[in-house]
Amino acid sequence: MHKRNRTTEEKIEEVFYKIGITTKTIRQRYNGYTIGGYVYEIIKTVSDTIHKCFLMEQNIIKSNKSIRYKPNEKFEGWTECFINEPVI
């Protein structure tokens, strides 16, 4: 995700990866093309049962603790962010 200044659309250097699960489309979940003011790009999606997706998400979080990232601005799902692309 890239953080953009909301008034000038000027890039601010904050880039990170976010994982998450949803039963909606990503655009429905985050109401458009931004998440908490961060502009996002979809890198990969996986479709499976909600239970399997939850287990996969927890495994990714657990096995990638060393690259966890805390964004400058909190948003729904901010605890599922990484400084580098997480190993799946």
Image: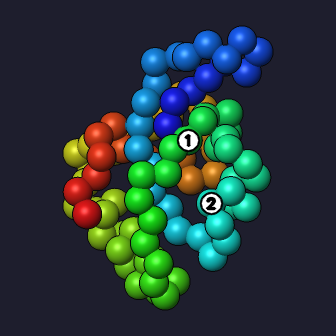
Type of amino acid under label 1? Tyr
Q: Is residue 80 visible?
A: no
Check disc 2: other Cα within 10 Å, few if <14, some if 14-19, many if 20+.
some
Residue found 72% across the figure and 12% down from its top: 8
Q: Quadrant of residue 62?
A: bottom left
Give the image location of residue 12, x and y in percent: 53, 16
Q: Is residue 55 above or below residue 18?
A: below
Instruction: Mark 1 and mark 2 in contact? Answer it, CB < 8 Å.
Output: yes
Give the image location of residue 57, x and y in percent: 39, 68
Q: Quadrant of residue 4?
A: top right
Type of amino acid under label 2? Ile
Residue found 41% across the figure and 37% down from its top: 16
- Quarter of the image for the C terminus: give it: bottom left
Q: Which mark is residue 67?
A: none
Asked whether 20 or 71 is in front, the reply is 20
Mark 2 element type: helix
Would residue 12 be found to the left or right of residue 62 on screen?
A: right
Give the image location of residue 52, x and y in percent: 41, 84
Q: Is residue 73 above or below residue 62?
A: above
Q: Quadrant of residue 84?
A: top left
Earlier in the chain: of badge 1 and badge 2, it is: 2
Give the image location of residue 40, x and y in percent: 55, 41
Check disc 1: other Cα within 10 Å, few if <14, some if 14-19, many if 20+.
some
Q: Is residue 47 visible?
A: yes
Residue wearing tag 2:
26
Asked whether 82 or 46 is in front, the reply is 46
Asked whether 27 or 82 is in front, the reply is 27
Would residue 85 be found to the left or right of residue 32 on screen?
A: left
Q: Is residue 83 above or below residue 5?
A: below
Separation of marks 1 and 2 at Cα, in angstroms? 10 Å
Residue wearing tag 1:
40
